[in-house]
Image (tube, rainbow, N blue to C red):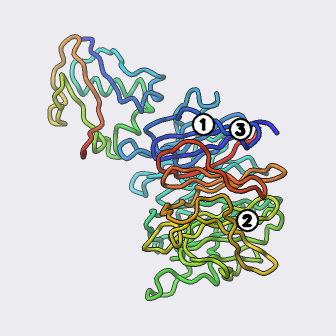
């Protein structure tokens, strides 16, 4: 199973004991997110809504492109990086 | 006097002023920058912070090392699925007699905890017979005030916008609406004992039968623990405002705003008014403030007091200015210009 990285927003570092970027083994984006939340359950409240979906205004990026919920089973390659980012709008 | 710390919760983090003498204030680097800090319970062994973010939600964070690190409480206040949503932690207090922790939240409800980390809903309030009539005001549907009787652990008061004042005489097992004498905000609705937009309520420090509240359009007092309320407004330029605070030497303060529709300093002048109980009227107590040309707002939790022999009174504005008045000295503006200020609390050590 490939080793990948996943980075989380700065504001949520106190839910991961100060880690901003984590390494884990995951075959898909969905599996990576599941493992992240299993290892750091305090993140659940901030990332998921009551129905277990990614909160509004949050996006998961793979190699700079958003991963749509329908594409969450996309296969990951070794050393790819997922970013969880807060969407910002306005100016 | 030890060190006085003034905790200032803002839209973009927690700021702390510290002072050895309440004359010279040092502004420290912000803590939890990026989070709105909507409430703080600063205790000697730990600090609890109500944190809110429009994306990440509302939770309680704790520090046991004076703000060097924070951890999110694993069981922050959450309503059961299919019920209400906690979108802001408005107030956290610790009962001086029972050591229980209480949190008032929006959507309006009360949570309690034995340790400050694991919170459970006070169902007796959520299931109150008037619950279906509760409606939000402009600041949301929020439980913002929790007061305790100093010697009777069974008696607790709550205040909610835009609902009213409540009292429990059995330690929170049941709640009675205490709004007799308070005008409803909307007068053309079917008469109800709720629908009273209490902005802030305080308890007299020496007489627990006396309460005061700043209302949506009125300032009220009660001499019978909230059973009956009457207006005390003489001398005020406006009866609209948010904060209210009282010192241990019985000085009661409000900061009038122009009106419901114009929520800035009454008559364009930042002024604090103090209550004179002998004449039952208010007088201007603003010496040292900057005078006319001020159009700030002071939010309901943005005024507080300390417990020093010569008590200090503090308030912060939505424009990010913080003011302090020590004893009968003139007000002084503290250094710095902060983000929009939500709340102030003092920790004395």
Residue B45 in view of the camera: yes
Q: Chain of mark 3?
A: B
At a point 64% along the width and 84% down the height, the residue shown is B181
Q: Residues within 10 Å of mark 1 (few under 14, many from 20)?
A: some
Q: Is the residue at mark 3 from the same chain as the one at mark 2?
A: yes
Considering only order in the chain, which callout, 2 or 3, is on the residue closer to the N terminus?
3
Q: Counting residues from the N terminus, which is met first, the one under dot 2 or under dot 1? A: 1
**B167 left or right, relative to A44:** right
Query: In the rendered view, does B311 fall on the left or right side of B179?
Result: right
Residue under label 2: B203
Residue A55: percent from left, percent from top: 31, 42
Quadrant location of the N terminus of chain A in the rendered image? top left
Question: Which of the pair B115/A80 is nearer the observer?
Answer: A80
Task: Give the numbered dot on residue B19.
Answer: 3
Quick one: A51 or B334, which is closer to the camera? B334
Q: Which chain contains the residue that carries disc 2?
A: B
Relative to B333, does residue B21 appear above or below in the rendering?
above
Look at the numbered discs 1 and 3 and tell me whether their residues touch, using CB distance below 8 Å.
no
Q: Is residue B83 left or right of residue B109?
A: left
Marks 3, 2: nearer the viewer: 3
Instruction: Specify the subunit that label 1 lies on.
Output: B
Q: Secondary structure at mark 3?
A: strand
Mark 2 surroundings within 10 Å by alpha-carbon count, few (fewer than 14), some (14 through 19), many (20 or more): many
Residue at x 73%, y 72% (from the top left corner): B275
Please, is residue B112 above or below residue B285 in the view? above
Image-quadrant location for residue B148: bottom right
- Looking at the rendering, in which quadrant would you find the C terminus of chain A? top left
Q: Which mark is residue B184?
A: none
Give the secondary structure at mark 2: strand
Q: Which residue is mark 1?
A: B27
Percent from the top left, x then y, of residue B12?
Answer: 45, 42
């Amino acid at each position: 199973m490939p080793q990948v990285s996943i980075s989380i927003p700065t504001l949520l570092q106190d839910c991961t004991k100060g880690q901003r970027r984590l390494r884990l083994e995951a075959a898909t984006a969905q599996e990576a997110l599941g493992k992240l939340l299993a290892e750091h359950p305090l993140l659940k409240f901030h990332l998921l809504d009551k129905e277990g979906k990614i909160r509004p205004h949050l996006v998961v990026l793979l190699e700079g492109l958003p991963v749509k919920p329908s594409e969450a089973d996309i296969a990951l390659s070794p050393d790819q990086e997922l970013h969880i980012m807060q969407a910002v709008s306005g100016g | 006097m030890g060190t006085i710390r003034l905790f200032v919760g803002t839209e973009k983090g927690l700021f702390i002023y510290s002072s050895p003498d309440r004359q010279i204030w040092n502004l420290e680097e912000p803590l939890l920058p990026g989070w709105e800090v909507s409430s703080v319970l600063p205790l000697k062994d730990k600090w609890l912070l109500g944190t809110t973010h429009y994306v990440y939600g509302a939770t309680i964070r704790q520090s046991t090392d004076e703000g060097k690190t924070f951890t999110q409480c694993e069981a922050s206040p959450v309503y059961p699925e299919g019920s209400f949503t906690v979108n802001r932690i408005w107030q956290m207090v610790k009962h001086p007699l029972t050591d229980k922790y209480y949190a008032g939240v929006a959507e309006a409800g009360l949570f309690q905890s034995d340790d400050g980390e694991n919170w459970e809903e006070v169902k007796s309030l959520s299931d109150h017979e008037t619950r279906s009539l509760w409606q939000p005001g402009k600041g949301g549907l929020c439980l913002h005030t929790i007061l305790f009787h100093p010697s009777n652990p069974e008696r607790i008061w709550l205040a909610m916008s835009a609902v009213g004042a409540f009292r429990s005489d059995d330690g929170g097992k049941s709640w009675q609406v205490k709004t007799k004498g308070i005008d409803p905000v909307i007068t053309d609705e079917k008469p109800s004992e709720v629908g009273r937009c209490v902005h802030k309520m305080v308890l007299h420090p020496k007489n627990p039968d006396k309460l005061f509240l700043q209302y949506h359009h009125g300032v009220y007092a009660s001499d019978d623990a909230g059973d009956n309320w009457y207006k005390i407004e003489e001398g005020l330029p406006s009866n609209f405002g948010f904060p209210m605070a009282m010192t241990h030497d019985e000085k009661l303060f409000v900061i009038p705003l122009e009106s419901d529709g114009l929520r800035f300093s009454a008559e364009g002048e930042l002024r604090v008014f103090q209550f004179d109980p002998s004449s039952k009227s208010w007088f201007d107590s603003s010496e040292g403030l900057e005078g006319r040309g001020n159009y700030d707002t002071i939010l309901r939790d943005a005024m507080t007091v300390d417990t020093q022999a010569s008590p200090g009174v503090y308030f912060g504005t939505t424009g990010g200015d913080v003011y302090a008045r020590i004893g009968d000295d003139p007000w002084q503006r503290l250094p710095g210009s902060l983000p929009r200020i939500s709340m102030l609390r003092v920790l004395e050590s």
